[in-house]
Amino acid sequence: MKLFPNLSIKAKLIVLVVAISMISIIVGFSIVMVKDYLQIRRDLLNKVQFEAALVGEYLVGPLNFDSKKSVADVLEKMRAMPDIEHSFVYNETDELYGAYHKGQLSILPPTKPPSPCSRFGKGHIEVVLKIIADGYNYGTIYVRASTAVMNTTIRNRILWLGLIMISIILIASFLAFHFQRLISQPILTLAKVTEKISSDIDYSIRVNRYENDEIGILYKGFNSMLDKIQLWERKRDEAEAEQKRLMLELEAKNKELEQVVYVASHDLRSPLVNIQGFGQELSYSIKEADSLLQEMPTDSEETKQEISNILRADILESLKFIQSSTAKMDGLLSGLLRLSRVGRMSSSTFETIDMNLLFSEVANAFEYLLKEGNVSLTIEKVPSCLGCELEINQVFSNLVSNAIKYRDNQKIPKIRIFGYVHENGNQVVYGVEDNGIGIPREYQSKIFQIFHRLRPDETEGEGLGLAIVLKIVQRHNGKIDVESTVGQGSRFLITLPRAIG
Ligand code: ADP
């Protein structure tokens, strides 16, 4: 039950105490009033009945002796009974025998005596009694008394009770107003402390209370909850500091690693160039030496042939291996260098990119390859994103290049580029979909690793394109997903920050 949900506890307590005392007092006083009213009426009725009976007894003699004068004398005694206003006496033959009127005003007597009764009328009470003595009926007495005094008494009683009631209610309200603090104060203190804690975000504040009632228990529970929050806060702060430290360490390590990769791939290429150059030089010299050897006159043709074999088959062959290995190493190093350069030159503040324009530029760049491969490229209307245009261009160029490269020659190659706003509203998703050869499920996570290629002998490539794509996308706080089925095609989904406005 929710009573006065918008009132403060203080006001609720006062309202409750006053309402309860009001209801109890009104009910109690109403019962007393009704009882009093009935008692006062009963008292008046008894009194009038008694007076009528008394006068009736005095009338036995005059009625017995048939003396109207004596009857009138007895009735005159009624002046001493202030409530009685009119009285009529009938003899045994129901003939009106005497009448009494207190004031000037008189009322007409009933022609026949009414049957014995006692009843309240409007502003009066009527009592009719038979006058009986020694079992003999001497006649009837009719008495009519005013209820004005009784009504005034009742009115005064009600007035007094009303005044007492109002005084009690006022006293109850005053006491409720003062003593509600006993209950409301600690709750208000708790509410204030809670408010302060949440506004200052200070969990070191505590509530103090010494009593052992339920509010004391509530305070204790509140304080121990704050202890726990403080402990969690400390632990969280420590964990956050540790996380920050680790992140900084990781960042430094990453930078260091990138630097190492850059320096290594860059600097290792110079000795490699020397190896390649000198290897070349060596192979020329050996060829020269071989031709000189062929021209040289000798006695032993056999030894000459042996030396020539060593020069051609062993040394030149070995040199060829050295050269092809250095060329491969050069390729790997330049790949590493390219990967380590991603993000090095571009700024970290991103701009709004009109992706419709970017996709049409990518399509133009691949015009020749698309035509040559008879590939149909569909570009849908897409939303803009935030990023470094040069890098995002590289991402989609690599993806389109792969979609062309890994086409299925059994079908007409189709590529579709599409895009939509992510359901979170802060990102956009772009897709590059092809109907090419597809990627087996077990390799789908590996294709983003550097130098990882599925069919190195079937197509040309360095296994670097998707590693670069992943690095760029991660630099943009985005993500890349691949969905692919062998023989059906692949779909690469790139999520990037959305350009608002
Ligand atoms: P590269 O194309 O030079 O081999 P990538 O990093 O671009 O290097 O791709 C890695 C591997 O992923 C590729 O060797 C290829 O096997 C697979 N791959 C990438 N894109 C597709 C595609 N659209 N369809 C099928 N296979 C793909």
Image (cartoon, rainbow, N blue to C red):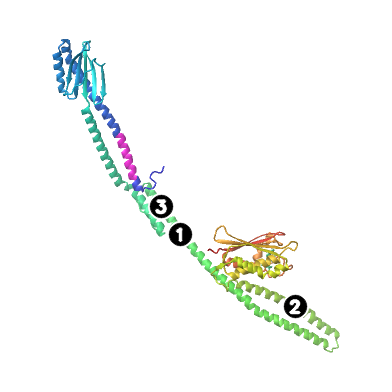
Q: Of the numbered discs in the image, which one, if any, rests on residue 150?
A: none
Residue 253 drawn at (x, y percent): 56, 70
Secondary structure predominantly adopted by residues drawn in magenta: helix
* Disc 1 C-beta below 8 A from ligand 1: no
- Determine contact: label 3, label 2, CB under 8 Å: no
Label 1 packing within 10 angstroms: few (<14), some (14-19), many (20+): few
The amino acid type, in three-letter code, at marker 1 is: Glu
On whether residue 70 falls in the magenta region, the answer is no
Residue 4 drawn at (x, y percent): 38, 45
* Distance (Cα) linking label 1 and label 2: 66 Å
- Determine contact: label 1, label 3, CB under 8 Å: no
- Determine contact: label 1, label 2, CB under 8 Å: no
Residue at x-position 15% and y-position 22%: 79
- Depth order, front residue of 325/105: 105
In the figure, is residue 65 to the left or right of 454?
left
**In this rendering, does residue 397 appear at all?**
no
The amino acid type, in three-letter code, at marker 2 is: Lys
* Distance (Cα) linking label 1 and label 3: 16 Å
The residue pinned by badge 1 equals 233
The amino acid type, in three-letter code, at marker 3 is: Phe
The residue pinned by badge 3 equals 222
On whether residue 22 falls in the magenta region, the answer is yes
The residue pinned by badge 2 equals 320
Image quarter of residue 425: bottom right
Residue at x-position 32% and y-position 46%: 180
Of pointers 1 and 3, the one earlier in the residue sequence:
3
Residue at x-position 29% and y-position 42%: 172
Residue range highlighted in magenta:
13-28
In the figure, is residue 230 to the left or right of 189?
right
Q: Secondary structure at mark 3?
A: helix
Q: Secondary structure at mark 2?
A: helix
